[in-house]
Image (spheres, grey):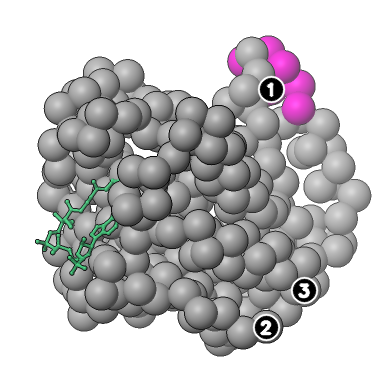
Amino acid sequence: MSYQNILVELRNRIGRITVNRPEKLNALNRATLEELDLAFRSLAVDAGVGAVILTGSGDKAFIAGADIKELSRLSPVEGREFALFGQGVLHRIETLGKPVLAAVNGYALGGGCEIALACTLRIASGAAKFGQPEVNLGIIPGYGGTQRLARLVGRGRAQEMILTGETIDAAEAHRIGLANQVVAAEELMSRTEAVAGTILSRGPVAVRYALDAIHRGLNMSLEEGLAYEAALFGLLCATEDMKEGTKAFLDKRKADFHGR
Ligand code: COA
């Protein structure tokens, strides 16, 4: 598969997608979003891929948002379609069944912040900046920002970011729980790969079910979420991974998981 706006690589079972429009600060035009959709679809079904890292090319931006030139021309009907399509791509990322780590190397604004929010974890370089500046353009976040940001950092902080449109730095993003970790720019990729590698060394079915339980559970009552967790826990007790993981602990050796 050849792409114009993104780069897709695979190394050590980790797929890496790099949005590659540095001259436009990796802004998401329609073509780029379509390519991201295709790339995530294909990594989702590739058994050789256990985790995905999403980043931006250049040292300035992760993704500086939806392409403002394109969105400035949208009619109301097109605007709704634009939001629904983007939301669909981000939903795919959030429910990929594999961890997706955002390596946030610079500006993560608007749709860039939203796509990072749809990722499983966000590792930021010290130079990263996060924000939902849509109100400066007379619009609101349309790729799930009003929903995911409030769920992740709480309503008060989400309202502050979305209503002021102000950008926060990596340290503040870390303080409010938006960034999981902040590392030096030159260590961003190695650190993100290390975190992905740690997750890949764990029981693969357990990782997949944990992601599913957390995602679905957030849309359930606590009681329903707990019942769902218990059902998945029971199911995991039937896996080879569970037999191997518990036996390896008792044998005082490293587990050799096969995702079965
Ligand atoms: N959509 C389209 N183009 C964008 C873009 C976006 N979201 N963000 C940046 N670009 C383009 C700029 O238009 C410029 O293109 P040009 O060289 O053809 O004029 C290029 O990327 C470089 O951006 P520039 O603004 O010159 O860089 P800067 O360092 O002065 O400022 C930002 C960086 C991120 C503060 C600024 O680009 C910005 O505010 N971008 C928009 C962010 C935003 O509102 N995102 C939400 C969209 S819903």
- The quarter of the image holding the N terminus is bottom right
**Residue behind mark 1:** 226
Within 8 Å: ligand 1 and the Cβ of disc 2? Answer: no
Does residue 95 show up? yes
| Whether residue 180 is situated above or below residue 126 in the rendered picture | above
Q: Examine the residues drawn in magenta and state their main secondary structure.
A: helix
93 or 63, nearer to the observer: 63
Q: Earlier in the sequence, mark 1 or mark 2?
A: 2
Q: Position of residue 12 (x, y in %)?
A: 58, 85
**Residue 6: in magenta span:** no
Give the quarter of the figure containing the C terminus: bottom right
Q: CA distance from mark 3 to mark 2?
A: 17 Å
Q: Secondary structure at mark 3?
A: loop
Instruction: Report which residue position mark 3 lands on.
Output: 47
Residue 224 covered by magenta stretch? yes
User: Quick check: marks 3 and 1 in contact, CB under 8 Å?
Assistant: no
Report the Cα–Cα distance between label 3 and label 1.
Answer: 30 Å
Q: What's the magenta region?
A: 222-228
* x then y, percent, for residue 42: 71, 69
Q: Nearer the viewer, mark 3 or mark 1?
A: 3
Which residue shows up at 76% across the image and 27% down it?
228
Q: Quadrant of ligand 1?
A: bottom left
Q: Residue furthest right?
A: 238
Mark 1: few, some, or many residues within 10 Å (few <14, many ≥20)?
some
> As shown in the figure, which amino acid type bears the numbered disc 3?
Ala
Binning the other alpha carbons within 10 Å of mark 3 as few (below 14), some (14 to 19) or many (20 upward) gives: few
Tell me the number on the disc at residue 1: 2
Of callouts 3 and 1, which one flags the residue occurring earlier in the amino acid sequence?
3
Query: Quick check: marks 3 and 2 in contact, CB under 8 Å?
Result: no
Which residue sits at x=58%, y=37%? 81
Secondary structure beneath label 2: loop
On the image, the x and y values in percent for residue 236 come to 81, 47
